[in-house]
Amino acid sequence: MKLRNLARAALLAGVTSLALAAAPVQAAGKHLTILASVPDMAFPFFVHMMNQIKGEAQKLGDITVIESDGQRSSPKQTADIEAAITKGVDGIVISPNEVDALAPALQEAVDAKIPVVTIDRRVAKVPGILAHVGADNVKGGEAQGELVEQLFPNGAKVMNLQGQSGASPAIDRNKGLHNVLDKAADKYKFVFEDTAGFDRAKGLTMTESALDAMKSPPDVIVCANDDMALGALEALKARNLIGKVKLIGFDALPEALGQIKAGNMTATIEQMPGGQSRGAVDTLVAFLRDGKKPAEQVTLLTPIAVTKDNLDKAERLGEVK
């Protein structure tokens, strides 16, 4: 019960900080055209973010959204930004594929006086960005580590599937996981670590290869997103290891929530992607229509661990089939 109360408090804190950051916006006003860009629409997580961006724009009224699918290509996403600059869009909401690779194009936008709000992945090298609305991915990784400690107070063998190289969420989530478990490195042993690129197929093949190479399976597999976790789940199923090996994902996708509900996955991390996306649009439109700058340049929501015991805290629980 204590854990559930802590989770509830963390969620409320995150939502409160977002509400403070995004000033109220009138339902309609000056017509706006904004570029909405995400790294790869092949990922359900980014499809959800794009839908939330479009939904919030429609709610605010008189906004044309230009959709950009980065297709997991920084050059493609860069080209989309440059095309939007040429078109003369009023603003940009973007989750960058790679923060360093996208910095020059976003600097071009800022230099062209086009306000930019980043979501999920912050581009710290471009100081002129209007705002960033995201999740504290370090704390998300720490939530994974803390859950491992709770599940295995006497220690555990840990397999760690990391996310896309160069992507700030992957870097931060891995950092958070190690922040917690490295404090007791004598108890928590990382028996395997490698990047599966946030990809489900790679999560499956990497888990298969790792399990085949081990004399005994790990106690827990920690994944930097749910797609990799769902791939790892297939490898566990094939080896009759469901329930014997704990499995922790990140993103709280409906499919992952369904697997948690069924008892096949242990947990995932909820980072409120809808809240991030809506907050980013609200922040951008408040500035464009009313000249209101956000109260804080960076707003980070606090992710929480979602297990079978607190599924009601998941943003997308209603989408579980």
Image: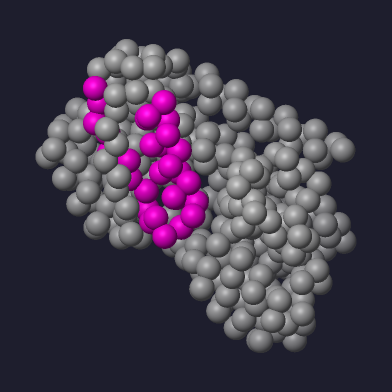
Q: Tell me the quadrant of the picture where the C terminus can be found.
A: bottom right
Q: Magenta segment: does it hold 86? A: no
- Please tell me which residue lies in front, 26 or 98: 26
Question: Residue 54 location in percent, x, y?
Answer: 38, 37
Quadrant of residue 127 in the image? top left
Above or below: residue 171 compared with residue 129: below
Identify the residue at image location x=77%, y=34%: 6
Q: Quadrant of the N terminus?
A: top right
Residue at position x 74%, y 64% from top? 264
Residue 63 position in % (x across, y down)? 29, 28
Residue ID at (46%, 61%)? 164
**Quadrant of res 293:** top left
Residue at x 86% of width, y 57% of height: 153
Tell whether 252 sits left or right of 99: right
Residue 140 appears in the rendering: no
- Which colouring convention does the figure follow? one colour
Q: Position of residue 179 (x, y in %)?
A: 65, 51
Task: Residue 8: give x, y in percent of width and height.
Answer: 73, 33
The magenta span reads 31-59
Residue 58 magenta-highlighted: yes
